[in-house]
Amino acid sequence: MLANRSQNYADLMEWSPILKEQNINFVNVQYGDCQKELDDFEDKTGIKIYNFEDLNLKDDFESTTAMMQNLDLVIGPASATLMQSALSDIETWFFVSRIPFWTFGDETPKWQPKVKVFAKDENETWSPLMKASSKQFKIWIKSKT
């Protein structure tokens, strides 16, 4: 990842405060060749993120949507896959470096009640947002049990 993109996308290790929750299965929805990064993350943290290598997350929209519809929540950066999730009426949390124009300043866009936007100040690191969001994730988990 180039430096100018790092302000828009948190490194996988920065997701650890959220991903360290016990008894939760995490599934990769990031398209592209990221298996090495997932393996390195698991080696360093012990956290397994499942990756269905036979599913073409970039070009097979129907299968990708079907898979995501079987997830309780889809979280990640503002990417095509997350937009696909949100537009398929799946509960989706976006992590962004600034509030996107399409929310019109709302944390939950009025036309997408299952979407929540977590925005950091574009000049800050990802760590404070991820730590704060992990608390909201715990609350969300409790609401589902």
Image (cartoon, rainbow, N blue to C red):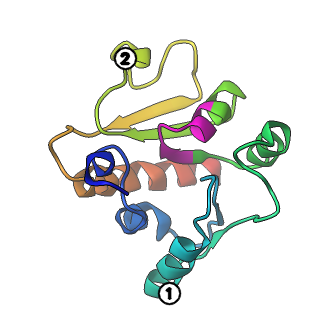
The residue singled out by tag 1 in the image is 43
Horizontal side of 81 relative to 17 (left or right) equals right
Could you tell me which secondary element the residue under label 1 belongs to? helix
Question: Within the image, what quadrant is residue 18 found in?
Answer: bottom left
Hey, what amino acid is under mark 1? Asp
Q: Quadrant of residue 55?
A: bottom right
**Other residues around mark 1 within 10 Å, as few (<14) / some (14–19) / many (≥20):** few
Q: Is residue 27 above or below residue 81?
A: below
Residue where numbered disc 2 is placed: 101
Q: Nearer the viewer, residue 142 or 46?
A: 46
- Residue type indicated by callout 2: Phe
Determine whether, in the image, residue 27 is placed left or right of residue 47. Answer: right
Q: Which residues are magenta?
A: 75-83
Is residue 78 located in the magenta-colored stretch of the structure? yes
Q: Determine whether, in the image, residue 106 is placed left or right of residue 36.
A: left
Instruction: Give left or right: position of 7 versus 111.
Output: left
Q: Residue at x 60, y 53 (%)?
A: 30
**Residue in view at x 47 percent, y 32 percent:** 116
Residue 17 screen position, x and y as percent: 38, 65
Label 1 vs 2, first from the N-terminus: 1
The x, y position of residue 103, in whole percent, is 42, 18
Which residue does the image show at 60% across and 46% down from the upper left?
74
- Whether the magenta-drawn stretch holds residue 82 is answered as yes
Viewer-nearest residue: 102 or 135: 102
Return the residue nearer the eye: 31 or 126.
31
Residue 33 x %, y %: 61, 63
Image spot of residue 35 (x, y percent): 61, 71
Secondary structure beneath label 2:
helix
